[in-house]
Amino acid sequence: MAPRTIVACGGFPSGSVVDYALGFAGGRRILVDTTAYPERELEWPEEWNAEPTHLSFYPWPPDDLRELALSHDAILVCGGSTANMLAVWRVHGFDRILREAWESGIVLFGWSAGMICWFEAGVTDSFGPQLEGMRDGLGFLGGSACPHYDGEAARRPAYRRFVAEGFPAGLALDDAAAARFDGTELVEVVSAAPPAGGYRVGRDGEARIDARPLDG
């Protein structure tokens, strides 16, 4: 079986985080999915030294959606409304294509919505300015996820409260941190700007995960 790699990012990734993720891919061809925030065009940072192809489901998906996805080395999922994104993906069968891509060795990565989506559950503002727990992620990874742990003041207390009240335990990431999963196992947390890092969050509270600093 091909290696199955997911790199979950707490916030908008730096060039060093993108380089890190692409280090596990077979090349630098990235399919960029902005479904979570379709009205905002992603300005491609020059420091992301890669070859992007932008995917849009509007007004309809491309006829060769599966072939397009599987022809890339990595798939980058941008931030925005996780709930809306998942609904669009499922209507068009892209959720199944993403699983096939993952199982074939294509690296999956992303920030915010692009972090939450791979897990069973996550903390999201998809339903309004208030944070809520959502339980219908893709489920490639078990448990829950919370991005922007140090970047948005409401995230940490909301996630800890949700988990204490019965929401699935899981992983929180600061904005400049990323977590790599091989298969379904967390291998490491990396940081583009220490002391940003990760946390395991359970009913008894949180435990910090040591993050390896990235160069650059």
Image (cartoon, helix red, strand yellow):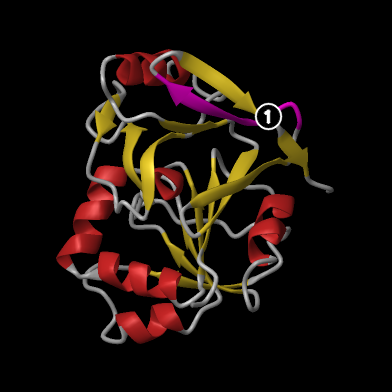
Residue 176, quarter of the rendered image: top right
Q: Which residue is mark 1?
A: 196
Q: Mark 1 packing: few (<14 Cα in 10 Å), some, or many (20+)? A: many
Closer to the camera in the image, 183 or 7: 183
Residue type at the position of mark 1 = Ala
- Taking the image as shown, residue 128 lies to the left or right of residue 186, namely left
Range covered by the magenta-colored residues: 194-202
Tally of numbered tags: 1
Closer to the camera in the image, 35 or 2: 2
In the rendered view, tell whether residue 169 sits above or below residue 184: above
In the rendered view, tell whether residue 76 sits above or below residue 134: below
- Is residue 153 visible in the rendered image? The answer is no
Of all residues, the one furthest to the right in this rendering is 215
In the rendered image, residue 159, in percent from the top left (x then y), is placed at 39, 21
Q: Is residue 195 inside the magenta stretch?
A: yes
Closer to the camera in the image, 57 or 199: 199
Under circle 1, the secondary element is loop
- Is residue 205 visible in the rendered image? The answer is yes
Residue 27, quarter of the rendered image: bottom right
In the rendered view, tell whether residue 159 sits above or below residue 97: above
Q: Is residue 216 inside the magenta stretch?
A: no
Task: Tell me what residue is drawn at x 34 percent, y 50 percent.
Answer: 36
In the rendered image, residue 116, in percent from the top left (x then y), is placed at 39, 43
Task: Tell me what residue is drawn at x 37 percent, y 45 percent.
Answer: 142
In the rendered image, residue 72, in percent from the top left (x then y), is placed at 51, 79
In the rendered view, tell whether residue 180 sits above or below residue 107: above
In the rendered image, residue 110, in percent from the top left (x then y), is placed at 50, 52
